[in-house]
Structure formats: structure tokens, C-alpha cells
Image: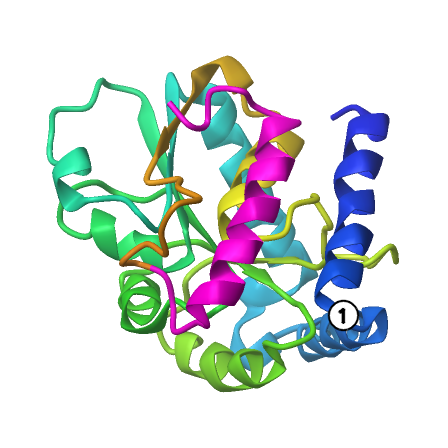
Amino acid sequence: MDALKLSERIAIQHEIREDFGWDYRDDQESAEGLLQRFNSEAPFGLSSWNRQGRQAALESLTAALKAAEKIVFVGAATKRSMLDRDWSQGTVFVAADGSVGACAGLVDVLVVVTDLDGGVHLQEAAVRGTPMVVHAHGDNKSRLETLLPQWAKYQPPVMLTHQTDEIYDGMLNVGGFTDGDRAVCLVSFLGGDEDKFTFLGYSTEQVGEWSGVTDPAQKLRKLEWMATILDNFHSSWKA
């Protein structure tokens, strides 16, 4: 993707940290700690989770996105009734964290973009072997340490993202902040055609039922930042 657009999407992460009073070093330590746990020939006992395996998963995801006729982003305010319909052939679904629960039994999810606070819905997706793009940031270190060893039993394809300026081999910063807007940034980064994007359950007015445990007031502030990112990126996300 365009290097200038990517740099702009990464730069806004600094504005968000400043707004919330978060320490850059916490994000950096989380990213480096996660990568260290994956820096072996068989992370958590899985060769499919090593550098080459994660790259293969990323290439498979990229190919599926480029071949898709429609790319549907599923956000936390999605109602299951929105998904309970006949979708055209070639439609793929990208779920933001716990919103994968809205999809269960209705549509197959191509990938989940997650910072691991999606609770039981995320765990059920891991059991099903749904590919996961796992994100490291300053306040999810304990979830990373707890959930990844559990998921290794089910062997879902895993890819890694972070939100720092550093370049890490085997881990991407695609821009974005919340799981919802980072999902859109990821697909754009991988070459998904923005003219094929459709958005379900992306709202700044409410904390969606598929959100993880959160402080509602802080979550609404986060959703304002999501809107800022998406407004500068894709004008149809509110449709």
C-alpha cells in the first residue's frame, strides 16, 4: 500500500496515546514480549506458528482478500439478524474481536482481528480454528500470556500486529487503534479492494453487545478515535 498513507495511519497512534495518557514504552514492551514468545521453530509447540508459518498464513489471507467479490467487516454492534441472509458468492467476513460471536453458525469468518478481550466468543473461534490476527499493546500482556497457550491446542492460524514505530520481523503495524478500524487498516494494507468493503455494526453511539468487558465511557472515547481513523480512510463505513 501507499507508504504515505501507512505512515499517517501509524502517526495517529501517537495522538491516541497522548489523549489517553498511555506510555509508548508499554506498547513497545508488549510487542517485543509477544514476538519473543514466537521467536522459535515451534512457538507453543507449533511449527505452524513460527515465522514461516505466520508468513504463509498472511499470504493465504492476502490471496483470499484479493479474490473476494465483497469484504464484510463485522463490528461489535452487529445484530445476528444482519448476518442471517443469503450472501452473494465470493463474500468474505472479517470480524473485529468478540463480534466473531455474531457470525457463529451464520457465516464463515475469514479472519478475526483481535487484542484478545473478546471473551468466550473469541475462545470458541479459536476452537473452530478460525485464523487470528493477534495484536500487542500496553494493557493486554496478561491476556497474551494466558490465551495463546490455550489456543495452541486448537492450532488456529496466527498472525501478529503491534502499534509502535519499530520494525519487527514477523510482526506488522498496519495502522489503526481499535479492533474495528485496525481490521479495515489490515485489509487495506494487504491489498483488499476498498470498493468492495461493506460495514456491519460499526457504531460510535453505543458499546456493542459483542464488545469485551470494558469501561463504557472510555470505550465511547475509543470509538470516537475509530471514527476519526475511518473518516480519513473510507467514507462509507457509517452506511
Give the residue type that dot 1 points to: Gly
Relative to 80, say whether 119 is above or below. below
Residue 234: in magenta span: yes
Q: Residue at x 42, y 66 (%)?
A: 216
Could one spot residue 178 in this view of the protein? Answer: yes
Query: If the image is split into quadrants, where does the C terminus sit?
Result: top left
Q: Residue at x 45, y 20 (%)?
A: 67
Q: Are there few (<14), some (14-19), or many (20+) residues within 10 Å of tag 1?
A: few
Relative to 39, say whether 193 is above or below. above
Residue 154 x, y percent position in the rendering: 35, 71
Residue 155 x, y percent position in the rendering: 41, 67
Residue 18 in the figure: left or right of residue 55: right
Residue 147 in the figure: left or right of residue 52: left
Could one spot residue 115 in this view of the protein? Answer: no
Query: If the image is split into quadrants, where does the N terminus sit?
Result: top right
Residue 49: in magenta span: no
Residue tagged 1: 21
Which residue is nearer to you in this view: 49 or 114?
114
Q: State the extent of the magenta-drawn residues as a range.
A: 211-239
Residue 113 x, y percent position in the rendering: 49, 52
Q: Quadrant of residue 83?
A: top left
Q: Quadrant of residue 9?
A: top right
